[in-house]
Amino acid sequence: QVQLVESGGGLVQAGGSLRLSCAASGVIISRSYMGWFRQAPGKEREFVARITWDGGKIAYADSVKGRFTISRDNAKKTVYLQMNTLKSEDTAVYYCAATTATPWDSWGQGTQVTVSS
C-alpha cells in the first residue's frame, strides 16, 4: 500500500484559488492511479479528478472541468489539485486516494476546503 498525506486546504472566498498537495510514500507503479475525492456535509463522497503517475490518463468530474487541474511531480511523489474559480458548492473535505492492488485502496486523512460566498 501507499501512505498519503494531504495539505493545502483552508478558507477562501468564492472566485479564489487553492492548491492541494498529496505526498505519497511507498511503492509507486507508473500506471497506477492517484486521485482526489471530496465529501460535503450530508453528502456522499464523490470523485473529483484522477491521474496516472506516468501522466498518460487524466479525468475530471463534470462539476470541476475547466476550473480544477490535477498534476503530479514524480520526483517528489506528489500529486496536486489546483482549484480555481472556487464556488461555495466546492466546500468539502478533500481526500487523496491511490489505486495500487485494488481500486482506491489507499486514502489520506483529508483536508478541509471552505469557500465563503
Image (spheres, grey):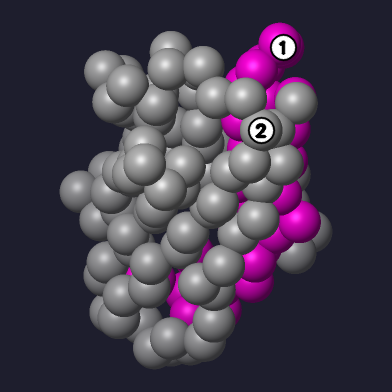
Q: Tag 1: residue type?
A: Thr
Q: Residues within 10 Å of mark 2 (few under 14, many from 20)?
A: few
Among all residues in the image, which is located at the extreme left? 66
Residue type (three-letter) at the residue carrying disc 2: Gly
Image position, residue 47 (x, y; %): 55, 37
Quarter of the N terminus within the rendering = top right
For mark 1, give the secondary structure. loop
Find residue 86 and report its image quarter.
Answer: bottom left
Precedes in sequence: disc 2 or disc 1: 2
Q: Name the residue nearer the viewer: 14 or 98.
A: 98
The residue at which mark 2 appears reads as: 26
Please say whether residue 4 is visible from this viewpoint.
yes
Horizontal side of 69 relative to 97 (left or right) equals: left
Which residues are drawn in magenta?
86-115
Helix or strand or loop: what does disc 2 sit on?
strand
64 in relation to 106, above or below: below
Question: In percent of the image, x 51 and y 17: which residue is there?
Answer: 29
Q: Is residue 83 above or below residue 23?
A: below
Measure the alpha-carbon separation of dots 2 and 1: 15 Å
Q: Nearer the viewer, residue 46 or 117?
A: 46
Could you classify mark 1 by the number of other residues whose Cα lies within 10 Å: few (under 14), some (14-19), or many (20 or more)? few
**Residue at 38% across / 67% down in the picture?**
19
Residue drawn at x 54%, y 73% as measured from the top left: 9
Residue 64 at x, y percent in the picture:
35, 49
Residue carrying label 1: 102
**Does the magenta segment cover residue 111?**
yes
Locate the C terminus by quadrant.
bottom left
Query: In this orientation, does residue 91 appear?
Result: no
Instruction: Name the one closer to the observer, 30 or 60.
Output: 30
